[in-house]
Amino acid sequence: MELHKPRVAAVSYLNTVPLVWGMLHGPQRGLADLSFCLPSECADRLRAGTVDIGLIPVIEAARQNLPAVPGTGIACEGAVRSILLFTNTHWKDVRRVAVDNGSRTSVMLTRIILRERFGIEPELIVMRPQLAPMLAEADAALLIGDAALRVQPELHPYEYLDLGAAWTDLTGLPMVFARWAGPKLSPDSAALFDGSWQYGQQRLPEIIDHQSDRRGLPRNLIRDYLTNHIRFTIGPRELEGLETYLSLAATLEPALTI
């Protein structure tokens, strides 16, 4: 009798590719029913029960009280490059922030940084991730994932924060953005995802070439991003950073499970 393959929802952003490379091209191929969507949609699919495991925003894992697969995920320590917050005014004067609601972790991180650093709690509005229209409607704009990678922030007239760097400046800790999680994890889950990442890690040059052609991003940008900005291993320091993030998030969202 054929065993049930886990239905796995992965994130469609560049930063996820090394994690799923083994499931796409390596020894883990065929071991999961793999699909791709935005991080927030991964969380919604888990909530709806249409997938078994998703690479979901850590804030959503807490909201849904879901156990996480140990070992791998999306994290950074210092600048992350793909989560950028721009403003067309002084930070303390920001009253409205346009956000791309693809990643709920980054939206909560925006709220935390603005409150802790500038003492403000602005209104959030959801818009398509296009910088100029966002800043025409709001005082600040959050770009995440590939949309942020397509922007050269230093060429814009706006002040901006890299939220990975802002988090580490605030706490001295890494920031964890997403983890594999699901309501009923099998004992084999860690081996599947760790094996897929190990396969991808060994083939980063191949991934860089492939993704540059596919996404139309410069190879040197992708190389720098995947090797110097993103961390794929969730160790003790990352877990400490995650605990700190969730504790601060709970002060803005009291019903949060931590």
Image (tube, rainbow, N blue to C red):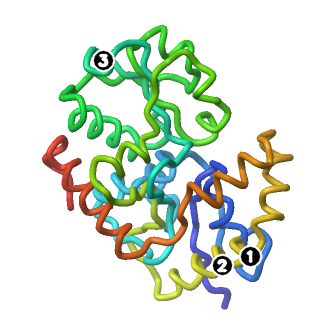
For the point 69% across and 72% down, the residue is 201
For the point 56% across and 42% down, the residue is 82
Q: Determine whether label 2 and label 1 are within 8 Å by CB.
A: yes
Report, in whole angstroms, how far the alpha carbon at label 2 lies from the one at label 1.
6 Å
Report, in whole angstroms, how far the alpha carbon at label 1 lies from the one at label 3.
44 Å
Residue 106 in picture, x, y percent from top left: 41, 42
- Residue underneath mark 3: 94
Q: 243 and 41: which one is in front?
A: 243
For the point 42% across and 68% down, the residue is 182
* Secondary-structure class at tag 1: loop
Residue 133 in picture, x, y percent from top left: 54, 13
Q: Amino acid at mark 3?
A: Val
- Determine the image quadrant of residue 229: bottom right
- Residue underneath mark 2: 198
Left or right of 98 on screen, residue 9: right
Report, in whole angstroms, how far the alpha carbon at label 2 lies from the one at label 3.
43 Å
* Secondary-structure class at tag 3: loop
Check disc 1: other Cα within 10 Å, few if <14, some if 14-19, many if 20+: few
